[in-house]
Image: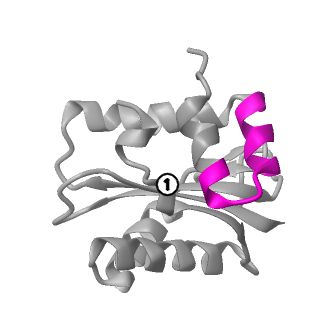
Amino acid sequence: MEIKDFLAPSDAIVGMRAVDKLALLNELSGRAADRLAFDGGYIAKAVLGREELGSTGMGGGVAIPHARIAGLQKLFGLLACTKRAVAFDASDSQPVDLVFLLLLPANPEPDHLHALASVARALRDPEIVGKLRRARNGPQAYQCLVRDPVRP
């Protein structure tokens, strides 16, 4: 499964502002809810509930918050490149400026589980991460993830 299968060009955001982790996750959940015609509180509760199990900040300024959403029919991704990094309780204790929100159906298909791995692989690639940080707008950020080859 490729990132373009669950991330639309319109769902890549550059220059997003957030004061902290909670505000960032609530903003992303609200945007996802608007795009999916879901209740924003429901998505935020699922995302924040998953985050309570352990931070999804994977280090290097990157986080991949994710949650299973009952009633969701297909994977949904939202990429945010923040204007300023925010504390995220990441594994390396560094603040986060690249966030990929991934929402999965409650009963995912086997290939859905590969989606999280493909996002993590891409966001561990220093070239892709560098290009994302230099992206001036959403379409440029989107192209960084869908055009650049990701090394296995």
When the figure is inspected, residue 60 is found, relative to residue 12, above or below; the finding is above
Q: Residue at x 49, y 61 (%)?
A: 11
Q: In the visual, does 87 lie left or right of 43?
A: right
At numbered mark 1, what does the secondary structure look like: helix, strand or loop? helix
Q: Callout 1: 10 Å neighbours few (<14), some, many (20+)?
A: some
* Residue 136: % across, % down: 77, 58
Boundaries of the magenta span: 126-140
* Residue 92 image-quadrant placement: top right
Judge left or right: residue 128 versus residue 52: right
Report the predominant secondary structure element of the magenta stretch.
helix
- Number of on-image labels: 1
Quadrant, the N terminus? top left
Q: Which residue appears at 44% of the width and 67% of the height?
A: 47
> Along the horizontal axis of the image, is 24 left or right of 72?
right
Magenta region includes residue 129: yes
Residue 25 shows in this picture: yes
Q: Circle 1 is placed at which residue position?
A: 9
Measured along the vertical axis of the image, is residue 47 above or below residue 90?
below
Residue visible at 35% across and 41% down in the picture: 5
User: Looking at the image, is 66 positioned above or below residue 146?
Assistant: below
Q: Position of residue 127 (x, y in %)?
A: 77, 29
The extreme top residue here reads 152
Which one is nearer the viewer's eye here, 24 or 50?
24
Which of the image's four quarters has the C terminus? top right
The spot of residue 107 in percent (x, y) is: 16, 49
Where 31 sits versus 145, above or below? below
Q: Is residue 108 magenta?
A: no
Residue at the spot 59% in from the left edge and 42% down from the top edge = 143
Front position in the image: 102 or 94: 102
Q: Amino acid at mark 1?
A: Pro
Residue 87 seen by the camera? no
